[in-house]
Amino acid sequence: MIVPRVPVQHRRLLPDHRLSGPTPWVIAILMMLTLLAAAAGVGLARSANAIGQAIAGRVTVQITTANPVERAEQAAALRRRAAAQPFVRSARAVEQQELRATLGQWFGSAEGDDPVLKSLPLPALIDVDFIGAERDEHVQALRALVAAEAPGARIIPHAEWLGPVARLIRSLAWVAGALVLLMALASAAVVIMTARAALGTHYATIEMLHLIGATDRQITRLFQRRIAIDTAYGIALGTLVAAAVLLLIGWQWSGVTSGLAATASLGVAGWGLLLALPLLAIALAALTARQTLLAALKKIL
Amino acid sequence: MMDGGGGPRPGGAMVEFDGVGLRYGPDAEVLSDISFNLQPGSFYFLTGASGAGKTSLLKMLYLAQRPSRGIVRLFGEDLVTMPRHRLPGFRRRIGVVFQDFRLIPHLSARDNIALPLRIAGVREEDLAGPVAEMLSWIGLFERAEARPATLSGGEQQRVAIARAVIARPQLLVADEPTGNVDPDMAMRLLGLFEALNRLGTTVVVATHDIHLISRIDSAQMMRLEKGRMADPTGALRYPPANRV
């Protein structure tokens, strides 16, 4: 049992100094940081996955034929034939206006009506989404189509330019996971130090209890209960603060609808993990305290 | 198997020390070649100068220390090789009165006295009567809720003695139990030990007080000198039959 049941009269064997030491506060800080790191890790991992899925099966064909009429004909033919392929989910020609609007952001004209921009020859772009995961085979088949319909056009897999970003985000998620692990170890170390300090402080009582026939289990339950309850207070406090921080960030995040940031969210499983972490932390603290106490008591006859 | 084992063999000794030596760390032995038997229901005084090793010997008797060499048998079982997890059962059959009382400071006199019964798992409704009786006997019924710090040295000593005897131990070990009480209370406490002894408890009292020793006719005396048992007649190891 995480918080062992101890008769009320036995509980009095330890003086009632709840929350008087630094342990609950240190645990509260560690728990808050653990939850924030875990939330960041989950959010980043989901973002990396979302980006990865989005780019894994998408390529853009860039047709740069100099004659605009021929370029438009090649683009239309290629889009039509690509869309008819069984391995293609969709093939969409990017409108010139859309292209100008995107480029316009760099020219200081959101509507893409900059005269310089209008004078630039823009390539024809066709976004192709594949069905299934055999991307390399699909690209080869598409390459044959492109060679037939628009010789000289380039095929640009999205994974080539967004892949490093997804890998970076995934690396950050792993770093966040490592931080969670390190903070769990730090929390366990705090509990070990607390248990040892408690044994030192109450050594005379423990020796007395041993000499009148108390078993290690009886003594361990007393201390385990005290440490588990103190730790639970700290974990509850840390969880409340972390929840407040996450809600605040979530509220601000809800206004972000564009770019990579929009892919970040915790999801049901993420929230489940965050809710499970405090319970796991209490169990870890109780187990650590129990093992530390039993190991220390074995050194006493 | 029950913790604490069965008991001494019929006609056998309750405590047997054979060639026992004790050293702390790498230092020289504080006790050497200690051999004696304690018979069930007997009364023993342990004497010796300060530093002779009385407290070390008592520690082995109340299972706070294992010997460095030799054989120690308690209630018919070898304690040197006994697994640690069986010791609590044996300790519950031994009452100990410490020279420095060792009362738990944040517990009341009542809770300190009740401690051995609670540890043994006695229900609250069953221990209230014996604890109240014991408080009355030591004259502290009115101060049952007092913390040790508010009690005089003599009162603390009485609480410590009550705690040691409340579970009716088979072996009572007392280290200078009358060192902090006035002569009248010393005689009352000795009377309690004698009464327990008559009920079958084996009593070992370490003391400097030679007047105390003379008060109990049937008591045997053990004397430690520089870590060795002075028993020139061999009466401790081979007690006369009429003492058993």
Image (tube, grey):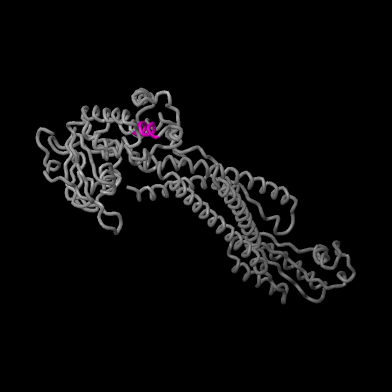
The residue located at (23%, 29%) in the rendering is: B194
Relative placement, left or right, of B24 versus A199 is left
B11 or A298: nearer the viewer: B11
Picture quarter containing residue B93?
A: top left
B88 or B53: nearer the viewer: B53
Relative placement, left or right, of A21 versus A93 is left
Residue A300 in the image, given as x and y percentages of width and height: 35, 48
- Res. B56 visible in picture: yes
Q: Which residues are magenta?
A: B153-160
Residue B24 in the image, given as x and y percentages of width and height: 30, 54
Screen quadrant of the C terminus of chain B:
top left
Screen quadrant of the N terminus of chain B:
top left
- Look at the picture and state if B215 lies above or below A49: above
Instruction: Identify the residue at the far right of this view.
Output: A115
Picture quarter containing residue A207?
A: top left
Instruction: Identify the residue at the far left of this view.
Output: B241
- Magenta: predominant secondary structure element? helix
Residue B128 in the image, given as x and y percentages of width and height: 38, 24
Picture quarter containing residue B193?
A: top left
- Res. B1 visible in picture: no
Magenta stretch encompasses residue A257: no
- Look at the picture and state if A96 lies above or below B83: below
The residue located at (35%, 39%) in the rendering is: A214
- Look at the picture and state if A279 lies above or below B197: below
